[in-house]
Amino acid sequence: MIIGIWSVNHTASNQASLENTIKPAAVIFEIPKVSEKPLIEEEIVLEETEEAVVPEDNQVEPELEEEIVIEEESKEDLPIAEVNIIDKLVNWGHHVPAGSRVIDTVIIHSCYDALGDEPYSIDGILAEFKIYKVAPHYLIGRDGAIYRLVIDQNIAWHAGVSEMPDGRTSVNKFSLGIELINLKTNTPTEAQYIALVELVEFLKGEYEIKHILGHDQIAPERKTDPWNFDWERFNKMME
Ligand SMILES: [Zn+2]
């Protein structure tokens, strides 16, 4: 417990501004010397579980500050090594097919919570989906977190009345739906593009995906999403 507080204080003092907090930092640094062994053991555990925690605990202060900055930048710029999917399975907006289904299409959507005060609220969006009895398979938050609402093998109700360029209808039957959270007046975030690319690449490994389309491309008279989606950027990231 003490270590947790120590780490938070230390990080906070770095972020606040080092020049104003030299004395508190120096005092804090003396704490590990008092009971060295248990503290080090706990620190190792923290390092394994918390990515953002300063990795080099007993090093010189300026180095710590630099490492924090690098980690913040790399979150935005570097692709995620593997897809991290958070299960938030829902009990509406989908059904179990009679047999196994063949998935060859991904449909990209946009959404936000229009009913509550927080348009990006995951729970708010889920509540809205529930009211309309719809669901995508995946929902990608502004921070790039990927939530699975419906398992791939179930038919999720996301496409509605729609038609593929090849003439097929009942698009839900053979597609996976992915919702990106953004407003009509803004764009998906960098983190969302990265997460989407990682997810679609993962799905391409699982299924023979032949079509990746926006909702507006299969229901042009009813739908305008994904809003402000940069297909050129997405396609380049998928290369
Ligand atoms: Zn849509």
Image (cartoon, rainbow, N blue to C red):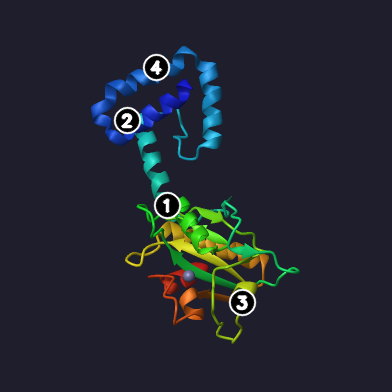
Q: Which residue is mark 2?
A: 13
Amino acid residing under circle 1: Ser
Q: Which residue is mark 1?
A: 121
Residue at x 71%, y 68% (from the top left corner): 97
Q: Residue furthest left?
A: 20
Q: Which residue is mark 3?
A: 210
Q: Which residue is mark 4?
A: 30
Instruction: Name the mark nearer the viewer: 3 or 4.
Output: 3
- The x and y percentages for residue 187 are 37, 65
- Up-down: is 108 above or below 146? below
**Label 2 SS:** helix
- The x and y percentages for residue 118 are 37, 52
In the picture, measured across the screen, residue 29 lies left or right of residue 158, that is left
Q: Residue furthest bottom?
A: 167
Query: How far apart are the two marked residues, 2 and 3, measured between alpha carbons?
Result: 51 Å
Q: Nearer the viewer, residue 22 or 2?
A: 2
Query: How far apart are the two marked residues, 2 and 4, measured between alpha carbons?
Result: 15 Å
Cβ atoms at labels 2 and 3 below 8 Å apart: no
Q: Nearer the viewer, residue 227 or 73?
A: 227
- Up-down: is 30 above or below 162? above
Query: How far apart are the two marked residues, 2 and 1, measured between alpha carbons?
Result: 30 Å
Q: Is residue 239 visible?
A: no
- Quadrant in the picture for residue 12: top left
**Label 3 SS:** loop
Cβ atoms at labels 2 and 4 below 8 Å apart: no
Query: How far apart are the two marked residues, 3 and 1, measured between alpha carbons?
Result: 32 Å
Amino acid residing under circle 4: Glu
Cβ atoms at labels 3 and 1 below 8 Å apart: no
N-term mark: 2 or 1: 2
- The x and y percentages for residue 198 are 54, 60
N-term mark: 2 or 3: 2
